[in-house]
Amino acid sequence: MSDFQPPGRLVTLSDVARAAGVGESTVSRVLRNHGSYSKRAGARVAEAVARLGYVPNRLAGSLAGSGARLVGIVVPSLANVVFPDLLRGLTAALDAEGVQGVIGVSDYDPEREEALTAALLSWRPAALLLTGLEHTLGTAALARASGVRVVEMIDLDGPGIDTVVGFSNRAVGRASAQFLRARGYRRIGYVGHDCFSDLRAGKRLAGFEEVLSEAGIGLMDKEIRPGPSSATAGRAGLEALMARCPELDAVYFSNDDMALGGYFACLAAGWAVPGRLALFGFNGLDFGAAMPQPLATVRTPRLEIGRQAAACLVGDGAKRIDVGFTVIEGATA
Amino acid sequence: MSDFQPPGRLVTLSDVARAAGVGESTVSRVLRNHGSYSKRAGARVAEAVARLGYVPNRLAGSLAGSGARLVGIVVPSLANVVFPDLLRGLTAALDAEGVQGVIGVSDYDPEREEALTAALLSWRPAALLLTGLEHTLGTAALARASGVRVVEMIDLDGPGIDTVVGFSNRAVGRASAQFLRARGYRRIGYVGHDCFSDLRAGKRLAGFEEVLSEAGIGLMDKEIRPGPSSATAGRAGLEALMARCPELDAVYFSNDDMALGGYFACLAAGWAVPGRLALFGFNGLDFGAAMPQPLATVRTPRLEIGRQAAACLVGDGAKRIDVGFTVIEGATA
DNA sequence: TCGCGAATTGGCAGCGCTGCCAATCCGATC
DNA sequence: GATCGGATTGGCAGCGCTGCCAATTCGCGA
């Protein structure tokens, strides 16, 4: 990108001022509708702006004024529906306020998260929105030193830098296990994706196993597939698990995509759901409700997290917002 | 967002210069590794930067230098996997070049797209990436006037402002119809989502119907669900369509999500796939491959579009890049 | 008609950084 | 030991806009 051609000279505020026959400050006041100016000045400026096709330069505006009206957002991935949903809630709330979100994707790599944090901070954002609670020391140091408000989203299981919005993944895992227990399942397995990178899936599993241990049964077996979650991984994972441990009567999946793959595995193998094998997911994605037997899962308020996170930026902000989650009974367990 | 607190005074480049005992220009040269400076100067600056925790202010840098190293991106939605995939390819390629992408979401609303375009241009981006070819006159005018390079992604069916990267949706529709025809299906229906907002789905349908008309059969019936595409919409859509027109032997869906819902409808109603009813989707999403009978669909190189679009920004750029698509035979048709 | 506070307005100094230019330094050459 | 070309370096003028302040104008009652 070395030969990016800078756009030629564009219309500036002082061009507008000259064209409108007023001072620069007046143009600035009119454009931002801030301070007082006469109707006549307003009209002349508006006319000049339209005629010249003036587009303000926010770079200059933010530099001169007090800070940029933008916030930095770091998410680990865009491949998992969770984050687009989060961003949707976030950007909707944000640009209702006229704030731009600048998004960075870390690919679940803490080092990249740190690099992105530094890069985003260099735009002097009004706030920084991170995902999860686990960051490098450098990320935390940067965030603190910058003095901007920091909001950590989605996870609630641990201490945050500043404000935290989300739900407890551990509690989700516990609730899922309790649900399966209450339904009488005892030979329970787990199919997940790479939980070293997806720490929150790991926390759910921990909560899940916790409850099973307390009940004296424990997880019979688990199959962890490398790479990101997907239906194909879920299908392959369940098939491997069942080959190894055919006496299972229920399987917990790291999320709905994995569970969908598991459901397909059952269809293909002719295992009745939930007669032969019960399935339980996570996220409450739309397709779960369309399945012949609606998927048993946990619905998470992803849009709401985004909205709340945005709200935290304006208010003085509670330090910790639990948006909760809902167990969806479905019919696969 | 009125009470955003501007961060207090932060470390500036001249603080670093003073601390390192060198001039500002030297610090600037060292930081950007541009121009020549001695080892000793480099070391002292690096030390001072680390000690002070200096984070450069790109607002100032971009204002002073020639343009910001960022590009504006407008997508219609984040709910449809297509766009996150696109963004993934795009941001990966982009930040390999050290360029930030600033993303705006238009919700399929041309007016919002125009507003976003103006907002993004006010950051003086090096380029503007839009989705599709249909824009308001205002959007096109803004884009042209800004003098930045404009890349329109995904759609190839029509004239572009500048550079265009994607595939022909019409051709996808045609290929899909030809595929179903070749398989011998004659009583073909369509289940889609709101195609007034999703213009590209409309173009696919147009191409599809074109082929059927040429074959002298035509589309028997179609069901358009309001709102965005989803498995639930697909299921409800297919159920409505079959209730009205039970003699159908194949259904074309506006995309794989809709087709997944259709598949679930078949499962629930006991319609054999493809014995009783053939299904055909669009996008080539992962779950299609995990289905008991892999979904017949068209795979689109979404990541590739992102990559190519990013590549267009550096090279002088072909005006028009066709990334093509692939028909996946699957087993549902 | 005059006076006065309020409304409106323009000038100008930065915001933090980069680009340009002139000054200084270095080692090596004669 | 003086000279020369290149490597290094610092000063300083903006980039386009906003915030502050002083100047000007306006409206209206006395």
Image: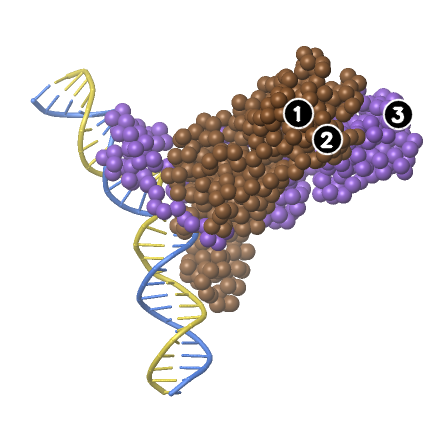
Chain colours: A purple, B brown, C blue, D yellow
Farthest residue to the top: give it. B244
Q: Secondary structure at mark 1?
A: strand
Under mark 3, the amino acid is Arg
Residue A160 x %, y %: 64, 38
Q: Are marks 3 and 1 on the same chain?
A: no
Residue B178 x %, y %: 65, 30
Residue lying at 34% horizontally and 35% vertically, measured from the top left: A53
Number of numbered discs present? 3
On the image, which quarter does residue A266 sit in? top right
| Tag 2 subunit | B
- Quarter of the C terminus of chain B within the rendering: top right
Answer left or right for A310 relative to A8: right
User: Are there few (<14), some (14-19), or many (20+) residues within 10 Å of tag 2?
Assistant: many
Residue lying at 28% horizontally and 40% vertically, measured from the top left: A15
For the residues bearing labels 3 and 1, Cβ distance under 8 angstroms? no
Nearer the observer, B102 or B32 = B102
CA–CA distance between discs 3 and 1?
Answer: 33 Å
Residue indicated by mark 3: A276
Under mark 1, the amino acid is Tyr
Residue A118 in sight here? no
The numbered mark, 2 or 1, whose residue comes first in the sequence reads 1
Mark in the foreground, 3 or 1: 1
CA–CA distance between discs 2 and 1?
Answer: 12 Å
Farthest residue to the right: give it. A247
Residue indicated by mark 2: B295
Residue B29 in sight here? yes
Nearer the observer, A89 or B225 = B225
User: Are there few (<14), some (14-19), or many (20+) residues within 10 Å of tag 1?
Assistant: many
**Number of the label disc, if any, that sits on residue B252:** 1
CA–CA distance between discs 2 and 3?
Answer: 25 Å
Q: Secondary structure at mark 2?
A: loop
On the image, which quarter does residue A143 sit in? top right
